[in-house]
Amino acid sequence: VQLQASGGGLVQPGGSLRLSCVTSGRVVSIGWFRETLGMGREFVGAIALSDGATRYEGSVKGRFTISRDNGKNTVYLQMNRLKSDDTAVYYCAARNTYALVSSPTGYDDWGQGTEVTVSS
């Protein structure tokens, strides 16, 4: 399994950004995580590719949306109303079973990160 995350960049507070995660190989569920210096890897949300079921971490619920385009083997993380606290390196991760897992240990494969900076 390979994952390629992209779409990070610099955005002002209140702005929006969409991250993409292109996958190859057997992937059943995708999780998005973010990491800041000294804070470890934090769960953002997850999606099951078969039915689109999603799960979100509390601080992003209502602002972030995870979706998928199975024809393009791509999962998206749409981030709206961004805050400075959302600044982090964002990662997508894959597992080959159906589960919306919040722990990083629940994922088998990881893409490289894409950096998101929210600043004026």
Image (tube, helix red, strand yellow):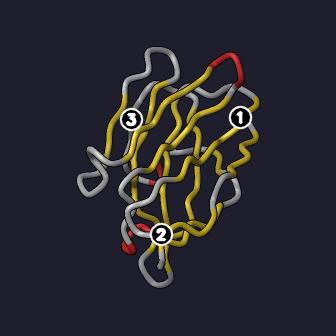
Nearer the observer, 49 or 16: 16
Residue 107, how many percent across, how many down? Answer: 53, 45
Mark positioned earlier in the residue sequence (2 or 1) = 2
3 vs 1, front mark: 1
Nearer the observer, 35 or 96: 35
Image vertical order of residue 107 relative to residue 89, above or below? above
Question: Mark 3: few, some, or many residues within 10 Å (few <14, many ≥20)?
Answer: many
Name the amino acid, label 1. Answer: Thr
Residue 10, how many percent across, how many down? Answer: 59, 69
Name the amino acid, label 2. Answer: Gln
* Mark pair 3, 1: CA separation: 17 Å
Residue 9, how many percent across, how many down? Answer: 63, 65
Residue furthest to the bottom in view is 38
Image vertical order of residue 108 relative to residue 74, above or below? below
Image vertical order of residue 29 relative to residue 40, above or below? above
SS at mark 1 in the image: strand
Residue 23, how many percent across, how many down? Answer: 71, 34
Q: Which residue is mark 2?
A: 12
Q: Which mark is residue 99?
A: none
Q: Which residue is pictured at 56% across the width and 47% down the height?
A: 18
Q: Are marks 2 and 3 in contact (CB under 8 Å)?
A: no
Name the amino acid, label 3. Answer: Leu
Nearer the observer, 38 or 83: 83
Q: Which residue is pictured at 47% across the width and 79% down the height?
A: 120
Q: Which residue is mark 3?
A: 100
Q: Which mark is residue 23?
A: 1
